[in-house]
Amino acid sequence: MSVAEIENMPPTDFELAQKSAAGDMDAFEELYRRHFRRVYALCLRMMGNPTEAEDLTQEVFTNLYKKIGSFRGDSAFTTWLHRMTVNQVLMHFRKRSTRSERTTEEGETPVQIVLGTENPNRMPIIDRIALEKAIAELPPGYRTVFVLHDVEGHEHEEIASILGIAAGTSKSQLHKARLKLRNLLKEQAALN
Amino acid sequence: MNCVKTLELISEFHAGALDETDRVVVHTHLLECVTCAEVFNDVEVIVRVAKVTYLETSIHFPDEHELWRRMNLTKA
Ligand SMILES: [Zn+2]
């Protein structure tokens, strides 16, 4: 690669982060443009609501701006930002659950299996929209693991490290989330 | 093996993460028990549909310029 080619290469996320930390607003705007869609998508998957996802996306970037100086480049920027986004969403859930008694942190309500025989109808044919609606009704703890594993495709070990839990906990949360979703989908279908 | 134990292991069975003994036992139970087989099929469907929920192509993104303008950035 020639010197000219290297000079024309777009700056890396790390370079942009360093410039942002030094107060270069254009560099931070470039970081925002690169990562906005990914952050918004994750917020939407976790919140299930576009307005809340938008607010949260703003919060994530505001927080990112404050903390950009602490990015040392030892992991990929996307990984670092992903983790920050998940944490921001979880903090939001926590704030919300202290305000409303309805939402429980981990969804301690035991999952009861709706047995096929109790329900004359098989589980309805589910589509994307029905599932998205049901995901939004999952308790936050289940929802987080389900979105990270089944929607975004992360491994349990990664999820465990993002959330600071054991991989076994991630596995059991995922399993409970799926069973809970099954019940929610059946309830939804019964209402329609 | 009873239904309760099978239902506990369904996600692990689905992930192919069970050891051979448990795998065979769950598999056999699923062949014999309609109720558990139904739950397993439903889990399979949920996992399959989850892969296509919120795809970037199906998300309606807000205006990123507008969002940028509304942002109030200050250093800590
Ligand atoms: Zn059974």
Image (cartoon, coloured by chain):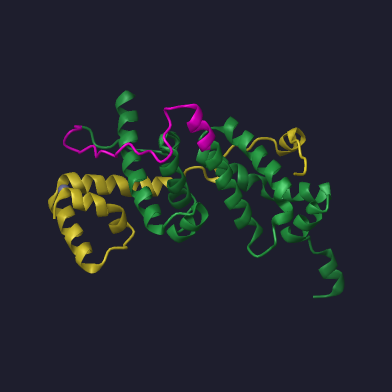
Chain colours: A green, B yellow
Q: Quadrant of the N terminus of chain A?
A: bottom right
Q: Which quadrant of the figure has residue B31? A: bottom left
Name of the residue lying farthest toward the top: A191
Q: Residue A113: where, in percent of width, then height?
A: 24, 40
Task: Please name whichever residue, A104 or A128, is drawn nearer the observer in this view of the structure.
Answer: A104
Q: Residue A97: where, in percent of width, then height?
A: 48, 32
- Residue A64 colored magenta? no
Task: Please name whichever residue, A40 or A124, is drawn nearer the observer in this view of the structure.
Answer: A40
Task: Please name whichever residue, B28 or A5, is drawn nearer the observer in this view of the structure.
Answer: B28
Determine whether, in the image, residue A42 is placed left or right of residue A187: right
Q: Residue at x 40, y 41 (%)?
A: A106
Q: Residue at x 45, y 59 (%)?
A: A155
Counting the numbered discs, the total is 0
Q: Quadrant of the C terminus of chain A?
A: top left
- Say if B17 sits above or below A48 in the image: below
Confirm whether residue A20 shows in the render.
yes
Q: Which residues are magenta?
A: A93-120
Q: Which quadrant of the figure has residue A178? A: top left
- Residue A97 colored magenta? yes
Determine whether, in the image, residue A142 is placed left or right of residue A94: left
Q: Residue at x 38, y 49 (%)?
A: A174
Secondary structure of the magenta portion, mostly? loop
Confirm whether residue A33 shows in the render.
no
Q: Residue A182: where, in percent of width, then height?
A: 32, 39
